Amino acid sequence: NKQEARAGRKASAVARTTTSSITITTMTDQFTLSNVACIDTAKSPHPISTGIGFFDHMIDQLNSHAQIGVAVTVTKNNGESSSAMSPSFEFVNRYADEDQALIMGQVGAALGSQLKELVYKGEESNSRTSRFCCPLDEALVECVLTKSSSSNNEGKLTTFTLPPYGRYPANKGRSKIGTMKTQFVETFFTNVAQSSGMDISLVKVRGDNGHHVVESAFKAFSRALRNLIDGTDTNNNTSDEFEKMWGEKSVSYTAGLELCREGKLERSTKETSILVHVLMNGLLKGSDSVQVDTGIKTMDEFVAILAKEAKMS
């Protein structure tokens, strides 16, 4: 039952009914992609190893922010072994000087085809849109994903305004982040869109640092994807579906309270002493359990409202 599977999502561990873990091999003239997997709410036993280190780091955002276990290994068609993995900089970036457009495009197409299994899950008549804006330091990127009414439709990258990647060099932005060429970020998302059947829009709201812009885009995409898979209505946070998944009577909410999570940080300097103690307890003792004294009235009011809305002491 789909609703039961959604309601069963907990902060600690999740058992979902839909998974996709299919090993495929895609041949090009130069490279082989193997161990390609997108597993819903579970880790893959295989690594992310494309030969472009920063690209690996970006794909890994799907693990953290979409809760999808992603794996893909790229090997050159010259007899080299994909099992001889090494953590060295040279190995992680072994294809930095190769055809990155080909690699990033093929990886995007392969992962997109796997994501399609999770996004559609046999549903042919349920179109949906998901939106997420992800800040990362000074950068902010908006991602909008649109699932069509048929899995037979080819998706498109409808909007892409990430370039220039940062303010420096002036009027150009960064051409590389680590060893990854930024111009092929668009190639990756174009292929993800086409093979997944989703329309993807990525809009840079702001961003001075190219690294932050790209990572904000991948995080926003991952979060929007999670919402799309779960069926979360990102345009209405008071819908019946939202309340079932995240409301005060949902399994997710009550399971979170049962964990009795709390955080405490104390720091002192010659001039000031700061104590922050947060209890994720649902404000069990009422609003009186929120005590804020920063010495700045506006800050006190802001933090108090934040605590009450988040229901934490």
Image (spheres, rainbow, N blue to C red):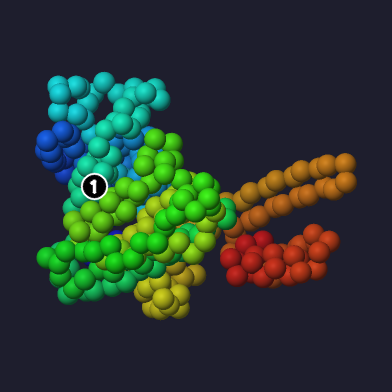
Q: Which residue is mark 1?
A: 105
| Front in this rendered view, residue 185 or 8 | 185
Give me the residue at 76% from left, 66% from top: 300
Q: What is the secondary structure assignment of the residue under circle 1?
A: helix
- The reply to whether residue 176 is visible in this rendering is yes
Residue 122 at x, y = what percent? 15, 64
Residue at 17% over, 68% down: 123
Residue farthest right in this picture: 271
Q: Quadrant of the C terminus?
A: bottom right
Depth check: give the residue in front, 251 or 306: 306
- In the image, is 243 to the left or to the right of 29? right
Q: Residue at x 81, y 43 (%)?
A: 268
**In the drawing, does residue 73 fall left or right of residue 26?**
right
Q: Is residue 20 above or below residue 200?
A: above
Residue at the spot x=76%, y=69% of the render? 298
Examine the rendered structure and indicate whether residue 92 appears above or below residue 213: above
Q: In the image, what residue type sits under mark 1?
A: Gly
In terms of image quadrants, where is residue 46? top left
Residue nearer the viewer, 223 or 75? 75
- 234 or 103, nearer to the observer: 103
Quadrant for the N terminus in the image: bottom left
Q: How many marks?
A: 1
Q: Does 142 sit left or right of 310 as displayed?
A: left
Residue 311 location, x and y as percent? 60, 66
- Does residue 108 lie above or below 233 as drawn? above
Expressed as whole percent of the image width and height from the top left, the position of residue 288 reads 73, 69
Work out whether residue 244 can be spotted. no
Q: Residue furthest front?
A: 171
Q: Residues within 10 Å of mark 1 (few under 14, many from 20)?
A: some
Direction from residue 222 to residue 283 in the image, left or right: right
